[in-house]
Amino acid sequence: MHAPLGRERFDEARLINIANALTAFRVLLVPLFAHFLITGRVRRSLIVFAVCGLSDALDGLLARKLRQRTVVGFYLDPIADKLLMATAFVVLAYVKILPVWLAVLVISRDLFILVGSVLILLLHGSGRIRTTVASKTNTFVQVLTVIYFLAVRAFPEVGQAAPGTEAAATAVVVGLCALTTTVSGLQYLFIGMRKISHE
C-alpha cells in the first residue's frame, strides 16, 4: 500500500526498466520456489526465496536512485510481494512444514484487506490505505517466519545439535506471526470502518 498516485513521481517515458524487470523476474521465480518446496528440495527453495528478497530490495533501490519509478512498477511490485508471501505460506502449510491455521490466518488477513479496499474504492473512489507501522512490522515478521521454517527444514542438523530449543523457537515464531497478523488486520478493520463512516 503506497501513497496516492498524485504524490508519486513516475517516469512516464518508460513502461519497462531495470527495476520493473527485476520485479517481473521475482514473479517468475515464485512457481520455481513452490516447485522446489513441494518436491522436497527445501534448500533450493530457501535460496530462491533469498534471491527474491534481494531482488525486491534492489529494484526498490534502483527505482529511487535512477528515478525509474513507473506506474507499472507501482502496481507490479506489491503484487509480486503478496504473490510470493501467499505462495510461501500456502505451500509451507501444504507440505506440513508450517501450521495450516497460521497460513489460513495470513491469507484471510490479505483477502480481508483486499475486499475492504475494493469496498472503499466503490464507495469513495479511492481504495488506498496508508501502510501502518503494524503492517510493516507484520510484513517483516512474516518474512522472518518463512525464512525460519525453511531454514529449520533445510538444516535439521542445527536443531538436533540443541535438543529442545527448536520447539521453543517455533512456538515463539508462530505466536509472534499470529499476533502481528491479527493486530495489523484489526487495525486495518478500524481504519476501513472509519473511512467508510466519515468520508
Image: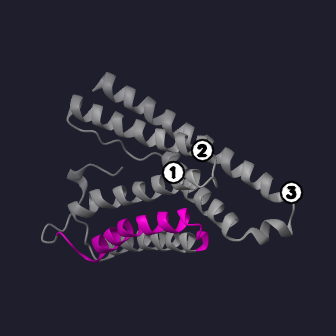
Q: Amino acid at mark 1?
A: Val
Give the label, 1 or 3, closer to the camera: 1
From the viewer's side, name the closer residue of 72 and 163.
163
Mark 1–mark 3 Cα distance, whole angstroms, equals: 27 Å
Asked if the stretch drawn in magenta spans residue 29, the answer is: yes
Residue 193 at x, y = what percent? Answer: 38, 26
Q: Taking 92 as reference, is 84 left or right? A: left
Determine the image quadrant of residue 57: bottom left
* Mark 1: few/some/many CA within 10 Å (<14, 14-19, 20+): many
Q: Which residues are magenta?
A: 15-43
The quadrant in which the C terminus is found is: top left
Q: CA distance from mark 1 to mark 2?
A: 8 Å
Q: Which mark is residue 100?
A: 2
* 108 with respect to 178 (left or right): left
**Residue 181 falls left or right of residue 62:** right
Q: Of the residues shown, which amino acid type is indicated by label 2?
A: Val
Q: Residue at x 54, y 62 (%)?
A: 38
For residue 31, above or below residue 196: below
Residue placed under numbered mark 1 in the picture: 90
